[in-house]
Image (tube, rainbow, N blue to C red):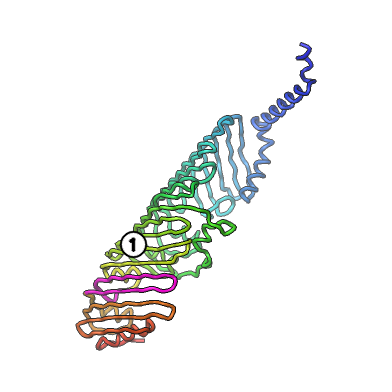
Amino acid sequence: MKHVRNFHRTRFGKIILSLLGVLIALYLLLFTSLGNRIMTPLIEKSLSYTLATPINVQEFALTRNRFHLLFQDNLGNTLSTQGGFSLLTLRMYAHYRIEGFQRGGFNPISKPFKTEGSLSGGIASFNIHGNGTILDGNIIYKIELHRFSLATMDVELTKIAYAQLMELLQYPSNTDTTISGKIALNGFDRRDVGGKIYLSTHTKRFLPTPITEDSNESVTLKSLLADPNGRVKPFHIDVELNVSLEHAGILEQFVGMPLGGKLHANGNIKGDEKHLRLNASSDVARSDATLLIEIPKLEPSVIIFDLKHADAEQAFALFALPAPLSGELSAYTELNSTDGKMQIVLTKATTRPDVLRDYYHITQPLIRFDATLNADLNKKGVHYRAAFKSDLARLEMDNTTTHDQMLRDLLKTIPSGSVRQ
């Protein structure tokens, strides 16, 4: 009994009592209403620093296995979450709700949005499931983190407003287009990304907008993937693409030219940091079209485009141009960093005098013809070889000249032709 009465006086006893006192103090500080009130200002300060905006914690409660938190920024954007956890297994589960009412504050997209969902898991695997409304559309998402790094993501989009998305990207757009689709990607944590991206658009109204100058011309694929030291870590990718556009004009700001008509394409991007390859196919303009882009060392080096048996009128419509002729169009283009070649073949073609007159200021009779144009491109210029056979004239050309001179030579061969300036 004497040893027991003197236990608190021994060195070991003092250590045990000190640890017990710390545990009691931590319990009182962390898991009681008094401790919660003491911790609230510290949490406000930490959240304000992390989110880079003043935060007001309205509700906070923490017990030994449950928690609840509700806070707002000065603009009324709100986040609330409540759930439970285990200190023994280091796992948690929770429900969350985020409402971004105003632009600014901790709202990351500068547009109103709402989302809610659930969190569950631990350090090894953490899952986030949720849904929300954003850009006048709906979104459902499932995200998995491995050791708090992104591993997989599954996103379903429904009627996302394209014009609002373009506004976020600081591009003009005048359309009622909406985007729907699915994105399912995995392997981010292993840097071995695979999956599928399916996107489709619905458009009732589209008006062209002036093409804006891109202030990020220096941005390249390599710069996007490099770390702050300019190094690209090894990776592998194999992603299937499927895109269907009711009006290709919505891409005008990205390709730098007016577009029109419908466009559907399937593709695949596959490879690694040493060599990427993009393969795509399409039935654009009722054709059989393929595209191949070779990207060694993240620098595009070879582009091959093959268009077979396209409807000429729809091909012109794709570039938002009135079709001056009808017939069957085939084209082949191969470009690399130093030179290239192109061939365009028109068969069973017929001019459209009204369109030539009204839109291209060229007066010509109705002409039925076949034509072939070859162009070899290099640093010295462009070498054209052309053959034109109609019911009125025949032309063969083999010369290095400008585009304008080639067109003038072609027009000279057609009787009764005139060009209004």
Residues drawn in magenta: 322-347
Decide: few, some or many residues near mark 1? Use Cα within 10 Å; few <14, some 14-19, many ≥20: some
Image-quadrant location for residue 68: top right
Q: Residue at x 47, y 58 (%)?
A: 274
**In the depicted view, which residue is nearer to us: 411 or 10?**
10
Q: Is residue 359 visible?
A: yes
Q: From the top left corner, tell me how far across and down residue 173 is, in percent.
A: 44, 64
Q: Nearer the viewer, residue 75 or 133?
A: 133
Quarter of the figure with the C terminus? bottom left
Q: Residue at x 54, y 34 (%)?
A: 91
Q: Is residue 164 visible?
A: no
Q: Which residue is mark 1?
A: 263
Q: Quadrant of the N terminus?
A: top right
Query: Is residue 43 covered in magenta?
Result: no
Please provide percent x and percent y for residue 157: 41, 50
Q: Residue furthest top?
A: 1
Along the viewing direction, whichever of 307 and 317 lies nearer the viewer: 307
Could you tell me residue 55's position as x and y percent? 63, 46
Query: Could you tell me which residue is drawn at 35 percent across and 67 percent down?
Result: 305
Q: Is residue 153 left or right of residue 372?
A: right
